[in-house]
Amino acid sequence: MKKENPQRRKVGRKPKAKPEKYRYVVRMDEDENRQFKLMFQKSEAVHHSKFIKSVLLNRTIKIIRIDPATTDFYIRLTNFYHQFQAIGNNYNQVVKAVKTNFGDKRAFVLLRKLEKETVELVIVSRQIVTLINEYKEKYLDTHLPD
């Protein structure tokens, strides 16, 4: 019989401190299975076994609900933000082009017209911020958990 050298490295994976060696089998009919799958999807758990253990042992289950209207609003707001950035970029290009291509008097007149349009753009942006705040107060703050 060979004796193992205590300094020799062991191969393979390290044994778990608390091995999970007990196994239970549960059978469900179609309705129960449908309900289980719905609960599993709502919890956004990754593994069935961990989800079942959390339910059986009365651990908290995390359920995240996604409101399609809020998601749609967020997507449209993001697209609008990109358009607003593009307008700012174009604004800078126009000002630079006016300064370099026109004389002082003509540039002054063109910049005055641009200034009037800018004031209208500021008014619209303030209205947008007001609408966002109203939406946030009505829909987002009321749906958040305490």
Image (cartoon, rainbow, N blue to C red):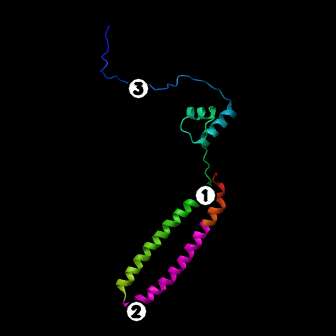
Q: Which of the numbered marks, if any, corresponds to residue 105? A: 2
Snapshot quadrant of residue 26: top right
Q: In the image, residue 112 lies at what x, y percent? A: 47, 87
The main secondary structure of the magenta stretch is: helix
Question: Which residues fall within the magenta stretch?
Answer: 103-132
Q: From what the image shows, is residue 119 above or below residue 67?
A: below
Which residue corresponds to mark 3? 14
Q: Residue at x 41, y 80 (%)?
A: 95
Question: Farthest top residue?
Answer: 1
121 in magenta: yes
Q: Are marks 2 and 1 in contact (CB under 8 Å)?
A: no
> In whole angstroms, how far apart are the C-alphas of marks 2 and 1?
49 Å
129 or 4, which is in the foreground? 4
Mark 2 or 3, nearer chain start: 3
26 or 130, which is in the foreground? 130
Q: From what the image shows, is residue 129 above or below residue 105?
A: above
Task: Check disc 1: other Cα within 10 Å, few if <14, some if 14-19, many if 20+.
Answer: some
Q: Residue at x 63, y 63 (%)?
A: 135
Please tell me whether mark 3 or mark 1 is closer to you in this view.
3
Snapshot quadrant of residue 132: bottom right
Q: Residue at x 66, y 29 (%)?
A: 28
- The kind of residue on which mark 1 rests is Thr
Q: In the image, residue 131 lies at what x, y percent? A: 61, 68
For mark 1, give the secondary structure: helix
144 in magenta: no
Mark 3 or 1, nearer chain start: 3
Task: Check disc 2: other Cα within 10 Å, few if <14, some if 14-19, many if 20+.
Answer: few
For mark 3, give the secondary structure: loop
- The kind of residue on which mark 3 rests is Lys
Q: Which of the numbered marks, if any, corresponds to residue 19? A: none
Which residue corresponds to mark 1? 70
- The kind of residue on which mark 2 rests is Lys
